[in-house]
Image (cartoon, rainbow, N blue to C red):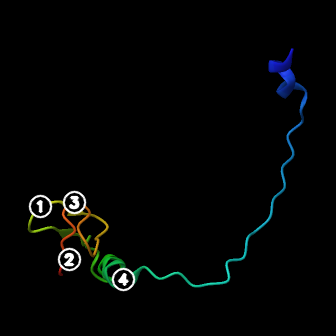
Amino acid sequence: MMKYWLETVEPLVYESRIKVPYTWSVGEVGSRFLIELRDHKKIYGTKCPKCNTVYLPPEKTCGQCFLNLKE
């Protein structure tokens, strides 16, 4: 009997909006990605010269070998 308790419950839905009191920044590398996409219609990524991992969207640091990725 306990496993059928959900069948007797009517769902309650409350719609609202959450106001976020701050501005979010994509950072230096993310900004370049979005600008290239908007202005030149090109997808920009980064590739680690040490382990050849490609990041799209681009990252500032390689997640595999922690090398600083320069543009």
Q: Amino acid at mark 3?
A: Gln
- The quadrant in which residue 58 appears is bottom left
Label 3, residues with CA under 10 Å away: few <14, some 14-19, many ≥20? few
Give the residue displayed 67% in from the left and 83% down from the top: 21
Q: CA distance from mark 3 to mark 2?
A: 11 Å
User: Is label 4 in a helix, a strand or a loop?
Assistant: helix
| Sequence-wise first label, 4 or 1 | 4
Q: Are marks 4 and 3 in contact (CB under 8 Å)?
A: no
At x 29%, y 75%, the residue is: 41
Q: Badge 1: few (under 14), some or many (20 or more) residues near its Cα, within 10 Å?
A: few
The numbered mark, 4 or 3, whose residue comes first in the sequence reads: 4
Q: Nearer the viewer, residue 55 or 65?
A: 65
Q: Nearer the viewer, mark 1 or mark 3?
A: 3
Residue matched to label 3: 64
Question: Where is 57 relative to 24, above or below?
Answer: above
Q: Amino acid at mark 4?
A: Ser
Which amino acid type is marked by label 1? Asn
In this rendering, the answer to whether 5 lies above or below 61 is: above
C-alpha separation, residue under disc 1 versus residue under disc 2: 13 Å
Residue ID for mark 1:
52
**Residue 61 locus on image (x, y percent):** 25, 72
**Which residue position is annotated with label 4?**
31
User: Which quarter of the figure is the C terminus placed in?
Assistant: bottom left
**Tag on residue 68?**
2
Q: Are marks 3 and 2 in contact (CB under 8 Å)?
A: no
Question: Along the line of sight, which residue is nearer the eye, 36 or 60?
Answer: 60
Q: What residue is drawn where x is 36% and y is 82%?
A: 31
**Tag nearer the camera, 4 or 3:** 3
Mark 4 → mark 1, Cα distance in angstroms? 23 Å
Comes first in the chain, label 2 or label 4: 4
